Amino acid sequence: MSQDKNKMAKSAQVQSNQNQSNLDPFEIEFLPQFEQGRGPREAFENEHGVVIGDHEYESDNSPLEQWTAETDPAVMAGDEWVHPFKDIGFQSAENREYFEKGIVPQSGIFMHPDKDVSYDPYKESIKKKEDEAEA
């Protein structure tokens, strides 16, 4: 490698290291196309009064702290529970390849098209009503 190319490569590596050092420990260096429109970089409070993105994983307002047998797990589903930049899930190899390098993940690896594994919380109540109607 020529000296100029070697200097450029070292400069790019130093720049990348500087960018990484400015990131939160759970953040990755998103490609520009993935940064726009993601949402806030700072921590935010969701509609349940739980702060998302502050690395404090216990909150008196969290459904996890008030969990009972009657709690519907769906209450903790959705974007309001995931920080757009600081989610630990971004650290997986597949997500880093996609969001930092633009490498699209392979599809179909864990798919079982002959199996229905979807969760339908109302399925049992509908079946029960149908059975009662037939009786």
Image (spheres, rainbow, N blue to C red):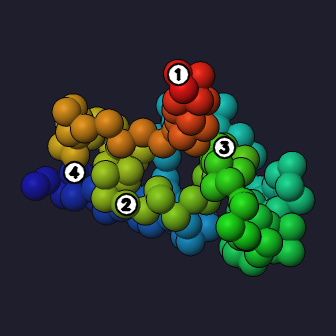
Residue on which disc 2 sits: 92
User: Looking at the picture, which amino acid does disc 3 mark?
Assistant: Asp
CA separation, marks 3 and 2?
Answer: 19 Å
Assess disc 4: are there few (<14), some (14-19) or many (≥20) residues with their C-alpha within 10 Å of its C-alpha: few
Whichever of labels 4 and 2 marks the residue nearer the N terminus, that label is 4
Residue on which disc 4 sits: 5
Residue mark closest to the camera, 3 vs 1:
1
Residue 38 rendering spot, x and y as whole percentages: 64, 38
Residue 118 rendering spot, x and y as whole percentages: 42, 39
Whichever of labels 3 and 2 marks the residue nearer the N terminus, that label is 3
Whichever of labels 3 and 1 marks the residue nearer the N terminus, that label is 3
Q: Is residue 9 left or right of residue 127?
A: left
Assess disc 2: are there few (<14), some (14-19) or many (≥20) residues with their C-alpha within 10 Å of its C-alpha: few
Whichever of labels 1 and 2 marks the residue nearer the N terminus, that label is 2
CA separation, marks 3 and 1?
Answer: 41 Å
Residue on which disc 3 sits: 79
Residue mark closest to the camera, 1 vs 4:
1
> Which label number is shown at residue 134?
1
Query: From this viewpoint, is residue 54 visible?
Result: no
Question: Which residue lies at the image location 43% right of the left edge and 62% below the top edge?
Answer: 91
User: Looking at the picture, which amino acid does disc 4 mark?
Assistant: Lys
